[in-house]
Image: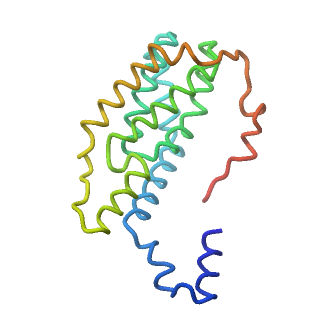
Amino acid sequence: TTLLLLIALIVFGILTPEEAFSGFSSDIIVILAAIFVISGALQRSGLIDAIGHRLFQFSGRSSNRFLFLLMSVVGGLSAFMNNTTVVALFVSPVMSVSKKLKVSPSKLLMPMAYASILGGTCTLIGTSTNIAVNGYIQSIGLQPVGLFEITRVGLIILGIGIAYLFLIGKRLLPDHPDESLMEDYNIREYLSEII
């Protein structure tokens, strides 16, 4: 859709070809593309499944310990990878562990998703929003944000968020034992992959 829109803007003379495709040379695009390549490599290598298995082993079959470890690992990874990608990578291992622990998947998936969002606040590359804002800051002539410049505040936010999710938030989540999210919500219809 984006490419068709760019072509239309060129055809109607609204943009020159140089203007239309200048965004593809942007640091933001290159960084995001690199993050997706790294994420794909982690998924294909089986590293994420191995991490999920290790977390299950370290938890000692305790759902509380697993949840804390999961949120910590996902939050940490989200500081260096796109948070949406981190969640997508961990959905399958977490669903598997939820069956082993006999815990509703929603009790693990929702805190994991929030930990991922909070982890993205720890570094410049944690979310595409941070990268885009940094690009804008540079474009208006201000000093760019350093990779770890926001880490101190991000770690505080992540720590408070994990504590809240672990102590209070998990009690507010619905308990749907034996739910099959993939079938109930037709998730497979919305999954796509670029090779």
Quarter location, residue 103:
top right
| Colouring mode (rainbow / by chain / secondary structure / one colour) | rainbow
Residue at x-position 34% and y-position 31%: 157
Q: Position of residue 150 (x, y in %)?
A: 27, 43
Location of the N terminus (image quadrant): bottom right
Q: Residue at x 48, y 44 (%)?
A: 42
Q: Residue at x 41, y 40 (%)?
A: 78
Q: Position of residue 5 (x, y in %)?
A: 63, 75
73 on left or right of 56: left
30 shown above or below 126: below
Q: Quadrant of residue 174?
A: top right
- Please indicate whether residue 111 sits to the left or right of residue 140 in the image: right
Query: Foreground: 34 or 10?
Result: 10
Percent across and percent down for residue 33 are 46, 60
Above or below: residue 173 compared with residue 183: above
Instruction: Report whether 190 appears left or right of 132.
Output: right
* Residue 148 drawn above or below residue 26: above
Q: Residue at x 41, y 73 (%)?
A: 25
Percent from the top left, x then y, of residue 97?
A: 58, 21
Classify 50 as above or below 150. above
Judging depth in this view, the residue of 44 and 114 nearest the camera is: 114
| Quarter the C terminus occupies | bottom right
Q: How many marks?
A: 0
